[in-house]
Amino acid sequence: MAMWKNDDEMFALMKEKLYTPVVGDILDQMGYKHQFLPASIRPLAAQVPTAPYILPGEEEDKRLKVAGYACTVLENDVFEYPAEKPFGYMTEALDDLKPNEIYIATGAHNSALWGELLTACGTPCAQPAPSPTATNAAWRTYAGHERNFCMNKTTENRLGGELRSHQAARRLLEELRRGRYADAAQLPSELELADVLGVSRTVVRDALSDLERDGYVERVRGIGTLVNRDVVRVENRMDQKLEFNRMIRSIGRVPHSDNLMVTRETAMPELAAKLGLDPEREHTLVFVRRRVLADETPVLYSTDILPLALFGGKRLDTIDFSRPIFEIVEQHCHVEVTETLTTLHAVQGAPGIRRQLGLRPEQALLQLDEICYSRTCKPVLCCQTCYTDFFDFAMVRKLI
């Protein structure tokens, strides 16, 4: 039986029970011989909670002790040409940290890897800022004028692994949908929005870029940021992530699923090709089938297909497959789905699906076939979802 239920408990246990020689022995047995970071990579902050192994009469161990997944960042000095987002990628890398990830950065030989801007974007690990009267050396250590550093970001520092600019964009969109700035010809300035949202101007600028890319606003030189009110009012956009639980709740219904069926099946060549699997080997796939209802009305039927190998030997009967599939993949497979390739069809649907959805003979289904990709552009899973006419969808097409 596992001694932990989730990553938080596992990493807490590692910090409490393990120490360097034991970790080294474990890595030796696993065949990992390159176990240590270069000497130049050092912690941004060296003070951490008390270590557990303190014998009577010994002092507390104040050395850095963190455990988590490595988020590696390579920075580079750029002087010859203007960058599209001079500091945007640095702040995005920091903002993109998920709970239990450790930020490890190197590179940039002629500039700092950490300074005031990143200090404003992140929370250093367990080390408050020095006092105003502290020595310059203390401030240099804190602010990151060392060449390399690592930083641990805990669960409380972010909301669901979301970039701050994405959070700001979502908050601003919610405000627009509630009618804020409805009487204004354009949105306030970036500085005013930064003050309202409690974020930096850089974050606001990236948030407005997100909203412009999605068609909610247009930034016109010499005029300002204009809002497309019609697009703002659209809820179920097929060009964006479709969360059917949210769509059902938005019209005052309660979503739930039944007829959940999880099976293991041998991959057919067509599915193996879509998932980027080696055609010379046999692969086992996990099929997750479910019917989704709004209150007591069946509204869709979904089939999610992913390689069994993604679960890394984890027992499937310990996983709650009634949850959204992307959440399952992120939590149990440690993979984040960032985009999908979707094809749409009007179909009659298989007889078994039609029976489960209680369709009339004349009713058709809208079928979405999706290949879902990770941030590294690798196929992760395939999804097939059949929607009834309970849903209305829209699509925003940016032409320039």
Image (cartoon, helix red, strand yellow):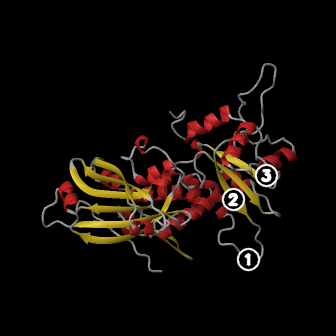
- Seen from the viewer's position, the closer of residues 270 and 116 is 270
* Residue found at x 45% / y 54%: 308
57 to the left or right of 316: right
Residue at which label 3 appears? 41
**Labelled pair 3, 2 in contact (Cβ < 8 Å):** no
In percent of width and height, residue 11 lies at 61, 39
Query: What amino acid is at disc 2?
Result: Val
Q: How far separated are the C-alphas under marks 1 and 3?
A: 28 Å
Q: In which quarter of the image is residue 82?
A: bottom right
Q: How far separated are the C-alphas under marks 3 and 2?
A: 12 Å
Badge 3 crowding class, 10 Å Cα cut-off, few under 14, some 14 to 19, many 20 or more, is some
- Seen from the viewer's position, the closer of residues 45 and 86 is 45
- Seen from the viewer's position, the closer of residues 76 and 229 is 76
124 to the left or right of 387: right
Residue at which label 2 appears? 73
In percent of width and height, residue 373 lies at 48, 64
Query: What amino acid is at disc 3?
Result: Ile
* Residue found at x 49% / y 70%: 213
Sooner in the amino-acid sequence: mark 1 or mark 3: 3
* Residue found at x 29% / y 71%: 345
* Above or below for 273 versus 250: below
351 to the left or right of 31: left
* Above or below for 264 versus 383: above
* Above or below for 233 versus 29: below
* Residue 180 visible in the snapshot: no
Query: What amino acid is at disc 1?
Result: Tyr
* Residue 288 visible in the snapshot: yes
Badge 1 crowding class, 10 Å Cα cut-off, few under 14, some 14 to 19, many 20 or more, is few
Q: The residue tagged with tag 1: helix, strand or loop?
A: loop
Residue at which label 1 appears? 81
Q: Quadrant of residue 190?
A: bottom right
